[in-house]
Amino acid sequence: MPSDKPISEKQLAAHRRNALQSTGPVTPAGKARSAQNSRKHGFTATKFTIIRLEDAEELETLWPTW
């Protein structure tokens, strides 16, 4: 819940310094990894990953039905 009390200049400067370090992933590998953060099941994903427990041939036959 936001406070109605204004913050001090010292605290504002600390927030700005911290924000310079919080820029998210920079490398292509980091961006690719973070893009998968909210993936739940992948049925509607543009990038499809098969895990060891799935049969690739069965998925190829099921894919057109989705």
Image: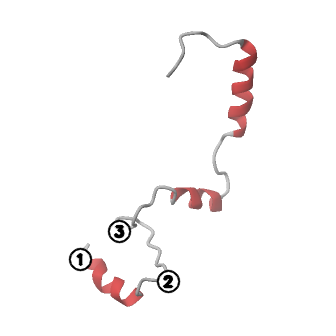
Label 2, label 3: how many angstroms apart (C-alpha)? 16 Å
Q: Nearer the viewer, mark 2 or mark 3?
A: 2
Q: Residue furthest left?
A: 65
Residue 33 quadrant? bottom right
The percent position of residue 58, horizontal first and vertical second, equals 34, 87
Please rate how many residues cluster around mark 3, counting C-alpha atoms within 10 Å: few if below 14, some from 14 to 19, many from 20: few
So how many labels did they put on this image?
A: 3
**Horizontal arrangement in the rendering, residue 21 relative to residue 29 (left or right):** right
At x 29%, y 86%, the residue is 61
Does the CB distance between marks 2 and 3 fall below 8 Å? no
Helix, strand or loop at disc 3? loop
61 to 41, vertically: above or below: below
At x 64%, y 58%, the residue is 30
Please rate how many residues cluster around mark 2, counting C-alpha atoms within 10 Å: few if below 14, some from 14 to 19, many from 20: few
58 to 16, vertically: above or below: below
Give the mark nearest the N terminus, 2 or 1: 2
Give the number of the disc on residue 6: none
**Horizontal arrangement in the rendering, residue 58 relative to residue 30 (left or right):** left
Give the mark nearest the N terminus, 2 or 3: 3
The percent position of residue 31, horizontal first and vertical second, equals 59, 56
Does the CB distance between marks 2 and 1 fall below 8 Å? no
Give the mark nearest the N terminus, 1 or 3: 3
Label 1, label 3: how many angstroms apart (C-alpha)? 11 Å
Q: Which residue is mark 1?
A: 65
**Horizontal arrangement in the rendering, residue 21 relative to residue 60 (left or right):** right
The percent position of residue 53, horizontal first and vertical second, equals 45, 83
Q: Which residue is mark 3?
A: 43
For the residue marked with disc 2, what is the amino acid? Arg
At x 49%, y 22%, the residue is 1
Q: Which residue is mark 2?
A: 52
